[in-house]
Image (tube, grey):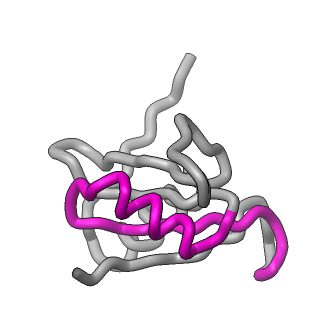
Amino acid sequence: MKVQIFQVDAFAEKPFQGNPAAVVLLDGARDPVWMQLVAREMNLSETAFLYPKTKGYHLQWFTPETEVDLCGHATLAAAHILWVLLITTSLGQFIHQRLQ
């Protein structure tokens, strides 16, 4: 099984600053035990796991110890990776909506 793993420094303008998070791109759902082991191996405060769904992507977050309900900086890191890949590979499109 081959997966893409990125390390992103959120809230940073230069490498080695900000808040690091791992982002793992998957082709589909994976066993949470496997995701936990990957997060432990990454040894960052959070690891985000992304896989495509019918309309969009599914996102899960893990610390080295447990799954968590939400992680802001890992979400931004995952969005950045999707943005870069969508621009460079035509994987899909971002839809922007202005909220009132």
The quarter of the image holding the C terminus is: top right
Q: Split into 4 quadrants, where in the image is the N terminus?
A: bottom left
Extreme residue toward the top, this view: 100
Residue 43 image-quadrant placement: bottom right
Q: Quick one: 85 or 15, which is closer to the camera?
A: 15
How many numbered discs sit on the rendered protein? 0
Residue 16 % position (x, y) = 80, 80
13 vs 3, left or right, is: right
Give percent across and percent down for residue 33: 37, 56
**41 falls in the magenta region:** yes
Residue 11 counted in the magenta span? no
Which span of residues is magenta-colored? 15-44
Q: Reply above or below: 6 against 25.
A: below
The residue nearer to you, when weighing 37 against 2, is 37
Query: For the point 60% across and 60% down, which residue is it?
Result: 64
Question: Residue 46, percent across and down?
Answer: 62, 57
In the image, what residue occupies the spot 27% across and 71% down?
Answer: 90
Image: 99 above or below 96: above
* Residue at the image point whose x is 51% and y is 45% from the top: 67
Relative horizontal placement of residue 82, taking residue 55 as reference (left or right): right
Quarter of the image where one finds residue 54 = top left
Q: Residue furthest left?
A: 54
Toward the right, the furthest residue is 17
Instruction: Look at 69% across and 59% down and name the residue there.
Output: 45
Instruction: Please state the horizontal and vertical placement of residue 26, each as a whole percent of the image.
Output: 29, 66
